Amino acid sequence: RFYEQAFETEKGYGSATEGRESDERIERVLALMDALPTMQQTILRLRHIEGMEMREIAELTGSSEVAIRKTLSRARQTLKQQYDKRYE
């Protein structure tokens, strides 16, 4: 998936070029994330950077798991659309 690939570590890359491409992609995704609404940014970061579970995010934010899943889905869609529009 797009959002998972964007945050993969450099582990397992076959060349320095692939590592640089990954770094560029991460930088681009993080820059696009900064333009998202605050709640979408927060949930994306907690889920994909901090590795938190949906239940944990729901407890932390005071939202339901359903609301977290919807917000995360919308954030992912927006991020992918913006990435494709700018870089693909």
Image: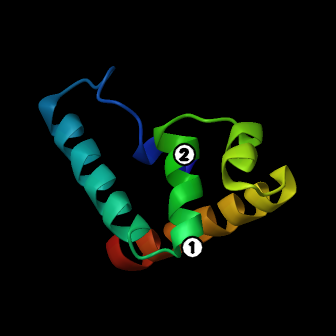
Q: Mark 1 or 2 closer to N-term? A: 2
Residue drawn at x 23%, y 37% is 18
- Helix, strand or loop at disc 1? helix
Position of the C terminus by quadrant = bottom left
- The mark found on residue 44 in the picture is none
Amino acid type, label 1: Thr
In the depicted structure, whether residue 84 falls above or below residue 57:
below
Asked whether 16 or 58 is in front, the reply is 58
Is 11 positioned to the left or the right of 20 in the image?
A: right
Measured as percent of width and height from the top left, residue 24 is found at 23, 53
Q: Are marks 1 and 2 in contact (CB under 8 Å)?
A: no
Residue drawn at x 59%, y 62% is 76
Colour pattern of the rendering: rainbow
Query: Does the rendering let one see residue 88?
Result: no
Pair 1/2: label in front: 2
Label 1 to label 2: alpha-carbon separation: 17 Å
Q: Label 1, on which residue?
A: 78
Amino acid type, label 2: Leu
Residue drawn at x 69%, y 35% is 53
Measured as percent of width and height from the top left, residue 70 is found at 77, 63
Q: Label 2, on which residue?
A: 46
In the depicted structure, whether residue 31 falls above or below residue 44:
below
